[in-house]
Image (tube, rainbow, N blue to C red):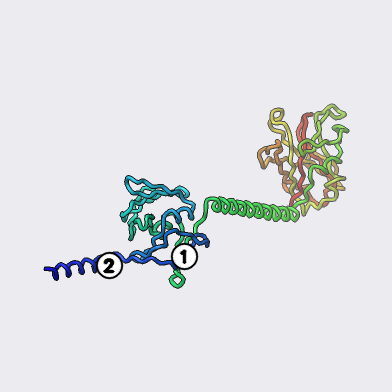
Amino acid sequence: MKKIIGIILAAMLLVTCAVTVVSADNDITVLVNEKAVEFDVVPQIINERTMVPLRAIFEALGATVGWDDATKTVTSELSGVKISLAIGSNQLYVNGTAKEIDVPAMIIDERTLVPVRAISEAFGCEVGWDGETKTVSITFITPEEAEKIAAELKAAEEAKKKAEEEEAKKKADEEAEKDAIKVEGEALLTIPLVNCTEKAFVMENGIAVTTGAANAAGQKDPIVTFGATLFKDIDAGKFKRIRVGLYYNKNEISDPKPEIYFITPEAGWAASRRVEGKAITEADEKGVVVYEFDCSANAEWTGTISNVRFDPFNDTRKFGISFIQILP
């Protein structure tokens, strides 16, 4: 009888050893972001899984630590991830979803030990194992680091976008230099008014503006001539379009119908040498509408153009010019 009992006990011991293999290993090192974690109870190798004291590893990760003594359940939270693990259970709950683990949490030497890989990966950490040095490496990004990285990425993206915009603007400016002669508003201050007023243009909000007045014949016809300043000896074969940025008050003038007249050294001003403008943009934030004049549509636009006159509208209202372009 004693012999039978002995055999049974031996068999039970063998089964137990096959199921749970436990060994304390003082040589195991756990690194969190390359910093060694200090434990008051040495890590255990249980069924080929590294078990570590939960409080030390949670605090190293920056996670909260909670304990429900009634249910013997460990709880923790890190960066919005909540986990819970009951002593002796093979179920790890991550934000309420159960996950099967090989080795349950257990109490050894009055300390709760948890599987370091399962816990760390539940928090989104990367876990590595070096068998030669017996080192567990845990890598994760802290909320502060994540915020810093996000800010750096955003700044880099904004810098890239700004550089691209500047490069695009540079190319556009280079093309404009090739295809057009552009005169900014400041240069328009010296352009005289003919049969209109002796008042000079003044700058308002980056636009050269003036107010037309009746001419000597009493006609309401504000005009501007550009010949001596901008349009002297233009090659009509090379430059065929003119664009003008015209400012006017739409509440006062609904459809200005601007026109351009031109002369050559051989022929003076005449109704036949006239081109009507067409609006090619809506009014911008300053109230400027871009008008284009297709001078090539007029058969008399040939040879050398010695002067150009701009008629914004038949009225004495205030008007302005933001830019002038001569285009191929």
Residue drawn at point x = 35 percent, y = 46 percent: 69
- Of residue 284 and residue 193, the one placed in the foreground of this image is 284
Which mark is drawn over residue 148? Answer: none
Whether tag 1 and tag 2 are in contact, CB under 8 A, the answer is no
Q: Is residue 20 visible?
A: yes
Q: Label 2, secondary structure: give it.
A: helix
Among numbered discs 1 and 2, the one appearing first in the sequence? 2
Side of 124 relative to 276 (left or right): left
Which mark is drawn over residue 17? Answer: 2
Residue 178 image point, x, y percent: 75, 56
> Could you tell me how many numbered marks the image carries?
2
In the rendered image, the vertical position of residue 21 relative to residue 114, given as above or below: below
Side of 277 relative to 309 (left or right): left
Residue 101 in which image quadrant: bottom left
Q: Is residue 105 visible?
A: no
- Which residue occupies the extreme front position in the image? 2
- Of residue 281 and residue 41, the one placed in the foreground of this image is 41
Residue 164 image point, x, y percent: 65, 54
Residue 174 in which image quadrant: bottom right
Kind of residue sitting beneath label 1: Thr
- Which residue occupies the extreme bottom position in the image? 132
Q: Label 1, secondary structure: give it.
A: strand
Residue ID for mark 1: 29
Disc 2 packing (10 Å; few <14; some 14–19; many ≥20): few
Residue drawn at point x = 38 percent, y = 51 percent: 94
